Amino acid sequence: MRRLPLLLTTLALCGGLAAFGALDRTGPAAPGPALSSTDTAGPPDGRSAPDSSLTHAISADQQRLRQLPTDAAAWARLGAEYVEQARLTADPSYYPKADEALHSSLDLAPQANADALTGLGALANARHLFDQAREFAEQAVTASPAHWPAYAVLADARTQLGDDTGATEAVQHLLDRRPGTASFTRAAYDLEQHGRTDEARAALRQALDGAYDPADKAFCQYQLAELDRNSGHAEDALAGYRQALRTDPDHTPALAGQARAEAALGRNDDALRDYTAAVARVPLPQYLLELGELHESLGHPEQAREQYRLLAAEQQLAAANGVVDDLTLGQFQADHGDPAEAVRLLRAEWARRQNALVADALSWALHRTGADPEALTLARQAQAHGWHNALFLYHLGTIELALGRNDDARTHLTEALTTDPAFHPLQAPLARTALTALR
């Protein structure tokens, strides 16, 4: 962490960034990196549908493999392309195809096949099998230490596993080998998670200044808008999301972000319209949950239930294709279903990976079942690295209030609303009510 800002400054003074590729980034409820067919990887959300170049690449590799089925490199490319197709369409049925193609490559070329190993790591990340992703990425690095995409996959896996030191080291290796969109955006996320928002912004601006492809530019603009939105600057965020959509009209995360900012500003009709459009493009569980909660906050119970029903269907489809996502299910159950089931799911997730997102979700589920002493320990753990996250602060303050720690509760509820007055359509009003009662 100490080296990252120095390296960012040095690269700025040198005035150079290398080639870039389209990336995606972790949403708060649905982390999981992806590897693109243009040898880039990233923590998700991405464009809404596969572009013509990806479709053409898949067709070309399929045709080549019909003619030359022993081409290990083509199998590895095809597998990575299927992972990208799944990311862009939110269709997990591509994952088994990717798995088969990548293992075919590895069977044909079992020695030093960094492309297949990196692709399998990206696939494992997309399925939330982060232990496996880390192992594949480490094998790829061992096979080819200069193969920079493997460090992107490794950084994503370690981030999700809660290995902060290891994630930072992987990001540093990525910066050393490939200063560009893939490395600067990961550096920004790493810095943001440690509460270093200004440095995260500087890293994203480095990436934006060197980006050429519209999808890359839109991705960087979207990430900058996310920093504004998570800091409570909804007007600035809205302008940033709109800029990203002007750059790349197909960038669905920016459309969902625009809806999020509109909801924060009370422009509810606009928010409902844009959320609905985003879900129609890419039915990610995160978008479905956010749209459902917005409907619920506006007194539309039937519309909210429909989004939650669709969310459950998407989760079942994902599970049928090898995705393990107890985090999203646990978060949903804690607030909209059975808190005891949420605890069961999130304990299983915590056993697999101990990062801040899971610590916060499990703490909240425990609070919802009345297990506040254990919840407090985990809520504090979620705050350990200084991430300025208003929802985390609200959860911590609410748990402290339940335990009679009124001064601490007042401090953290105030901090939540100061960080972002509209951090959640249902819970931000509850934070204001609790704070008023404390005062």
Image (spheres, rainbow, N blue to C red):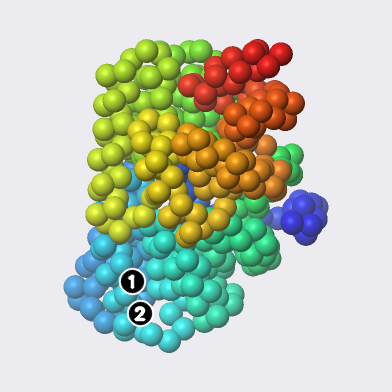
The answer to whether 72 is drawn above or below residue 416 in the figure is: below
What is the crowding at mark 1: few (fewer than 14 residues within 10 Å), some, or many (at least 20)? many
Q: Quadrant of residue 335?
A: top left
Is residue 409 found left or right of 9 in the rendered image? Answer: left
Out of 73 and 140, give the one closest to the viewer. Answer: 140
Q: Position of residue 185 (x, y in %)?
A: 60, 49
Task: Give the residue type that dot 2 points to.
Answer: Leu
Q: Which residue is mark 1?
A: 102
Q: Position of residue 165 (x, y in %)?
A: 68, 62
Instruction: Identify the image quadrant of the N terminus.
Output: bottom right
Which residue does the image show at 50% across and 68% down from the upper left?
134
Distance (Cα) linking label 1 and label 2: 6 Å
Which residue does the image show at 46% across and 24% down from the upper left?
259
Q: Position of residue 61 (x, y in %)?
A: 28, 66
Q: Residue furthest bottom?
A: 111
Q: Which residue is mark 2?
A: 106
The answer to whether 373 is drawn above or below residue 173 in the figure is: above
Which residue does the image show at 41% across and 25% down from the upper left?
293
Is residue 211 found left or right of 279 in the rendered image? Answer: right
Is residue 340 found left or right of 200 in the rendered image? Answer: left
Task: Give the residue type that dot 1 points to.
Answer: Leu
Instruction: Identify the image quadrant of the C terminus.
Output: top right
Q: Could one spot residue 213 in this view of the protein?
A: no
The answer to whether 78 is drawn above or below residue 338 in the figure is: below
